[in-house]
């Protein structure tokens, strides 16, 4: 029994005679039982990552700490419930994500409400629910919140600072650069922090410089940009650790990143503070794969095969939005004989899931697997071309359970007024 390409598949996946199993469940059998496309997640992998993250923070940070799952990466109630059980906090960026986190059973005290355009309704929803921490995006929001909280209460807040740091990632997922739509420049933060707020407890600072990042240096420079603002009880350094999507990509280690972030925080802020980190992708990406069925195979222009599957940009927007690379494999046959372009079923030529896959003689009916789809796949799924969104299936010790059912055609018109 071999582990299926270590970094790209869930920790408890396996290959037995070239048949892929996720969490002990045979991938072809899963495709038959739940249909395709389907998001399949390994529950043990999710739990192990959560434990490794919390353990690394406790080990490397000398003071209180909290790992807060950025729920935008995988806003699925069953997954949120798992992370709540594992003792993580949860970052919510809208009233909808807050609703899901509460439904999943998170203690409101460990929720962090984010957003650069929070409505009064969302702020009131958070106050009613008893959300522990609200991350202030701009000074005018502080004034609105101070008024909404009302006399006799104090709401814990963090101030989101835009450190003015560029990092090496796709421009669409860079957030800490000068002029970013998120947060406030250090000078505006300093002014906000110097004022008296009747109903706000200014617990500390927040930053999040971007996503799918690998080099530690931008986090260090960002923390250094926050340091002159003073000493605080809490620093939240955001998330953003990258993951490998293909075998050519660097592998990353969540626990090592956390150790590095604790060092960055210590160097910038000294000791005796609470450290909060908000990984999203790195907690869930490799825990999930997407299963597709091959619907058509035809010759391409330069000797490659065009392999069309029954999903595409409706279940994985990342190739379209960021030119993100992925790999593909067949669930029950090994080999990399044929150069293939794996395309989706949508009415756009850019609907390509994998540009240069190597597959062993793909045929109509094969189950095709795209790994590393646990983050921002289900989250950004859509109904383009009237394609119902896929189910989410959780696997553990050979048992598979449906966490989110597939949409039906009736769901497509359920909101008709
Ligand atoms: N904290 C804040 C305030 C964030 O805005 C984000 C992500 C995170 C934490 C988690 O970042 P992560 O560890 O997942 O990189 N749709 C894009 C990613 C957008 C991320 C937005 N914010 C993608 O598919 O790559």
Image: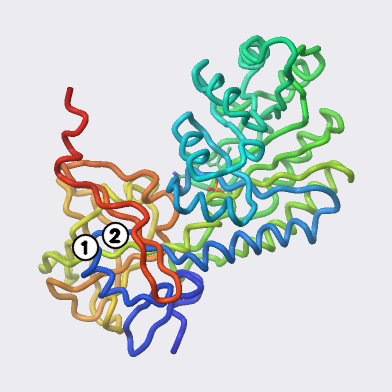
Q: Residue at x 39, y 83 (%)?
A: 15
User: Left or right of 208: which side holds 56?
Assistant: right
Looking at the rendered structure, the secondary structure element under dot 1 is loop
| Callouts 1 and 2 close, C-beta under 8 Å | yes
Q: Tag 2's secondary structure?
A: strand
Rounded to the nearest angstrom, the CA distance separating label 1 from label 2 is 7 Å
Quadrant hosting residue 167:
top right
Which numbered dot is residue 216?
Answer: none
328, 46: nearer the viewer: 46
Instruction: Assign the N terminus to one quadrant of the image.
Output: bottom left
Q: Is mark 1 within 8 Å of ligand 1?
A: no
Judging depth in this view, the residue of 150 and 276 nearest the camera is 150
355 up-or-down from 29: above or below:
above
Q: For the residue carrying disc 1, how many other residues have a C-alpha within 10 Å: few (<14), some (14-19), or many (20+)? A: some
The residue indicated by pointer 1 is 35
Please name the residue shown 69% across and 63% down the image: 256
As drawn, the label of residue 38 is 2
Residue 35 x/y as whole percent: 21, 63
Horizontally, residue 300 falls left or right of residue 357, namely left
Image location (x, y in percent) of residue 104: 50, 45
On the picture, is 119 further left or further right than 385?
right
Residue at the limit of the structure toward the right, as seen here? 271
From the viewer's perspective, is 355 left or right of 157? left
Mark 2 residue crowding within 10 angstroms, few (<14) / some (14–19) / many (20+) = many
């Amino acid at each position: 029994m071999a582990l299926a390409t270590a970094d790209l598949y869930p920790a408890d996946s396996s290959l037995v005679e070239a048949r892929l199993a996720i969490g002990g469940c045979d991938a072809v059998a899963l495709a038959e039982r739940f249909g395709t496309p389907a998001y399949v997640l390994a529950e043990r992998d999710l739990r192990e990552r959560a434990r490794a993250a919390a353990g690394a923070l406790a080990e490397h940070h000398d003071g209180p700490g909290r790992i807060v799952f950025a729920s935008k990466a995988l806003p699925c109630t069953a997954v949120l419930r798992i992370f709540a059980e594992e003792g993580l906090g949860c970052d919510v960026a809208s009233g909808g994500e807050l609703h899901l986190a509460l439904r999943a059973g998170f203690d409101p005290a460990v929720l962090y409400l984010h957003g650069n355009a929070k409505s009064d309704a969302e702020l009131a929803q958070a106050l009613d629910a008893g959300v522990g921490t609200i991350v202030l995006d701009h000074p005018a929001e502080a004034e609105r919140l101070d008024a909404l909280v009302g006399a006799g209460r104090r709401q814990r807040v963090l101030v989101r600072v835009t450190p003015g740091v560029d990092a090496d990632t796709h421009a669409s997922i860079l957030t800490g650069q000068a002029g970013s739509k998120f947060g406030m420049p250090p000078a505006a933060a300093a002014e906000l922090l110097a004022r008296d707020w009747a109903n706000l407890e200014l617990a500390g600072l927040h930053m999040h410089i971007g996503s799918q990042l690998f080099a530690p240096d931008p986090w260090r420079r960002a923390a250094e940009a926050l340091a002159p603002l003073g000493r605080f009880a809490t620093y939240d350094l955001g998330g953003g650790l990258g993951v490998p999507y293909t075998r050519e990509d660097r592998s990353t280690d969540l626990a090592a990143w956390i150790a590095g972030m604790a060092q960055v925080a210590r160097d910038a802020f000294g000791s005796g503070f609470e450290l909060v980190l908000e990984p999203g992708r790195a907690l869930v990406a490799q825990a999930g794969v997407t299963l597709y069925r091959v619907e058509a195979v035809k010759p391409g222009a330069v000797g490659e095969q065009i392999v069309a599957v029954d999903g595409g940009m409706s279940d994985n927007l990342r190739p379209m939005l960021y030119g993100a690379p992925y790999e593909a494999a067949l669930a029950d046959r090994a080999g990399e004989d044929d150069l293939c372009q794996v395309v989706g079923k949508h009415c756009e030529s850019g609907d390509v899931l994998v540009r240069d896959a190597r597959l062993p003689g793909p045929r109509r009916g094969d189950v095709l697997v795209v790994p590393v789809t646990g983050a921002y796949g289900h989250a950004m799924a859509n109904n383009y071309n009237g394609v119902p969104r896929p189910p989410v299936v959780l696997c553990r010790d050979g048992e598979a359970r449906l966490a989110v059912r597939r949409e039906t055609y009736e769901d497509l018109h359920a909101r008709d007024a």
